[in-house]
Amino acid sequence: MAQVNRGQFVASAWEDYVKQDPTDNIFPRFWLLENLRQGKSFRKGAGDPITGTIEYAINSTVKPMAELDTVDVIRVDVFDRYEFPWKFVGGVIVMSEFEKAITDGQAGKFDLLAKKIDNLKRSQENQVNQDLFSDGTGASGLQAGGLQLIVSVTPTTGSPGNINRATFTFWRNQQTSGAKTTNAYDNLLSSMRSIYNSCSNGPGEETPTFAVTTQTVFQGYEGLLTTNERYVRMGQDEKGVTGFKGTQLMFKDIPVAYDAACPSGDCFILNNRNLFIRYLTWMKAYPAVDPANQFIDVVKVLTMYNLCTDNPRRLGVVSSIS
C-alpha cells in the first residue's frame, strides 16, 4: 500500500525525546452532527424498525351547524406512524505485536493504540456526518437516508419513513430556489426568509433552530451582511458582524455555518425537534479478538442508527443557490 512518507511505524515510534501527538490533516468540523447530538434529538431507540406516531389529518366531521342539524357519524383516521430502518456503520482497529513492541514505554512518541481508537472514532463520525446529508442510495442502499432524502429538493417524490410524499402532502418538506436573478446571491436572503417562515408553526412558534450550507454559500451569505464594526461583543450569538473571529453567523435567531459534506448550492434550515438521530449502539467497541493465525489484536467498533423525522413540514431547503 502506498505510504505518504515513511508509514505509520516510523511516525508512531520513538525518534527523539520530543513527545507530541500526530497532527490532524483529515477531519473537518461536523456541524450537522454536532447540532443533532444535542438534547432529545440524539436518543437511544429500540424495536425494529424505528417508529413513531404522527397526527396527520383534521377531523372532517367538524363543521358549522344549525340548531337541529345532524353531525356526520363517520370514523376519521387521524393517526398513523413513520418507519425508518436501522443502518450500520462499522470499522476495526488492528494492533500488531510489532506495533506494541516498538511503541512500548519510553520508546513511543504517543500512545499508538489510544490514537488509533481516536482516529477510528472520528472516522466513524466523518462517515455518519456524510450519511446525514445523503439520499440513502449510497453503498447499494446500505447508507443511512440523510437530508437529501428527508429534506429533499424534490419534496413531492420519495418515501422517507415509508410514507409516500407523492400521495400524502402533509409529509412534504419546504423547498424553494435560491438561484440568482441578476447578481450573485441576490435572492438568497428572501429565499431563506421564506423557508424559515414556512418551517415555523406560526409567528414565533416552533421555529427553526439552525441552518447548514456549503462554505461557498456561507461566504456568499456573509458578504450580504451589513458591515458593522464593533468593539464590544455582549454574547456568543453576536457574530453577524465584522471585526471578530467566528465559525458561525446568525440568520434571524438561528446560527448558520457550513459543513464540508453539504451538497453544492443547498442551504438546509432545520430544527432538532423534528429532525433527530435514533441509535441502538453508538460507536460501541467490542473486546479485542486475537486471530489464531496472526500476531495482532482486532477491535471492532459498530454504530447502529438512522436519521429520522416526525414532521418534514417543519424542515426546509433553499436549493440551486447561485
Image: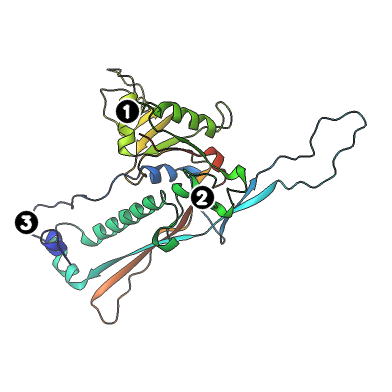
The mark found on residue 308 in the picture is: 2
Instruction: Compare residues 205 and 316 and report the one nearer the observer.
Output: 316
Q: As shown in the figure, which amino acid type bears the numbered disc 1? A: Glu
Q: Quadrant of residue 242?
A: top left
Mark 1 Cα within 10 Å, few/some/many (few <14, many 20+)?
Answer: some
Task: Locate the C terminus and report the quarter of the image it occupies.
Answer: top left
| Location of mark 3 (residue) | 16
Specify whether 90 is left or right of 295: right
| Location of mark 1 (residue) | 222
Q: Are marks 1 and 3 in contact (CB under 8 Å)?
A: no
Q: Residue at x 34, y 47 (%)?
A: 261
How far across and down, in percent of the image, does residue 298 sit? 30, 70
Specify whether 270 is left or right of 287: right
Separation of residues labelled 1 and 3 (CA atoms): 46 Å
Q: As shown in the figure, which amino acid type bears the numbered disc 2? A: Cys
Instruction: Compare residues 256 and 109 and report the one nearer the observer.
Output: 256
